Image (cartoon, helix red, strand yellow):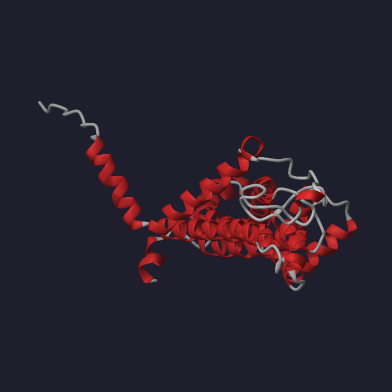
Amino acid sequence: MSIAIPASRPTAGTRFRNVTYWLRRYPLFAIGCTGLAIIVIVSVLAPFIATHDPIAINPGARLRPSGEAGLFGTDPFGRDVFSRVVWGGQISLSVGLGVAALAVFLGLAIGLIAGFNRVADAILMRIMDGVMAIPGILLAIALVAIVRPSVTTVIVAIAIPEVPRVVRLVRSVVLTVREQPYIDAARSIGTRFPKLLIKHVLPNTIAPLIVQASFVCASAILSEAYLSFLGLGIPPTTPTWGSVISEGRNVVQLAFWVVLYPSLFLGGTVLFINLIGDGLRDMLDPRLARSL
C-alpha cells in the first residue's frame, strides 16, 4: 500500500532564493515595477503629501528656486511646482490607463471579428488603414478641438489612433490560431461562433495584448503631454506634466526647475512602463527572449 507523503511547505530561505532568481532573471522588469510603483504611490497620495494648493497663485513668490519656496521651487505665477507635479501625475496616469483599456477593448473586439470573417476583414481593415494614414497626434488634436475639453475627451481622442495597432496585432494572432487542428475539431462538433472565439481563440491573444497594452499606456502618457503642452485637451486649471512644462518653457533660462522636475517624472514614468513591457514580453514569450 502506497503512503502519501505530504508536500513540505517552502521555507523562508527557499522563497528568498526564488525571489532572488526571479530578480536576476528579469532585472529590468523589477526596476520598472519598482519605479512605477513609487510614482503611482506619490501621485495617489498627492492630497496628503502636496505642500500647497496646486492652482493657488502667489505673485510674491514667483520663480523661487528649490529650498526657498517648496521642494521643487515655484513657477512664473508663484505656484508650488512640487504640488503641481504630484497632482499632475494623477491625470497623466489616468489617461494612460484609460487609453490602454479602451484601445485594447475595441482593438480586441474588432481584431477577433476581422481575423475570423473574411468579409468583415476586408471592410474593417480598410477602415483601420484609413485611420492609421492620419497622424495620431493630429487626429487627437482635431477631436479635442471639436468636443469640449475634458479628461474623457482626451482619453477617447488618444485611444482612437491606437486602436488600429491593436487590431492588427489581434488579427495576426487570430489568423494563425484559426488554422490550428483543434479549431477545426471544435467546428466539426458544432461549436458556435461566439463560444469558439471566447473559449479557443481569445486565450491566445492575452499574452501579446498585455505587452501591447503597456506600450499603448506609455504612448498615451506622452500624447497627453503633447496636447497639454499645446494647450489642448485638459482644462488649464487642471495641472498636468505637459502643462507645467509648457508654462515654464519661456522662463527655462531663469528657472530651469520649472521644466526639469515634470520632465523627469514624465520621462521616468514612460521609461518604467516600457521596461515593464519588455519584461512581460520576455516572461510571456521565452522563445523570443532567447532569440534576442
Observer-nearest residue: 236 or 84?
Answer: 84
Residue 118 appearing in the image: yes
Residue at image coords 70%, 62%? 223
- Horizontal side of 81 relative to 212 (left or right) equals right
The one nearer the camera, 70 or 198, is 70
Identify the residue at the far left of this view: 1
Point out the image quarter for the N terminus. Answer: top left
Q: Quadrant of residue 291?
A: bottom left
Residue 203 horizontal/vertical position (percent): 51, 50
Residue 85 sits above or below residue 181 on the image = above
Q: Nearer the viewer, residue 234 or 3?
A: 234
**Residue 123 visible somewhere in the drawing:** no
Q: Residue at x 88, y 60 (%)?
A: 145
Residue 146 appears at what percent x and percent y?
89, 58
User: How many numbered marks are there?
Assistant: 0
Residue 117's spot in the image, x, y percent?
66, 60
**Spot occupied by residue 214 in the image (x, y as percentages of width and height):** 56, 56
Q: At 62% from the left edge and 46% from the top edge, which residue is drawn?
A: 194
Which residue is situated farthest in the bottom direction here? 133
Could you say which is closer to the camera, residue 41 or residue 186? 41
The residue drawn where x is 63% and y is 52% is: 72
Q: Quadrant of the C terminus?
A: bottom left
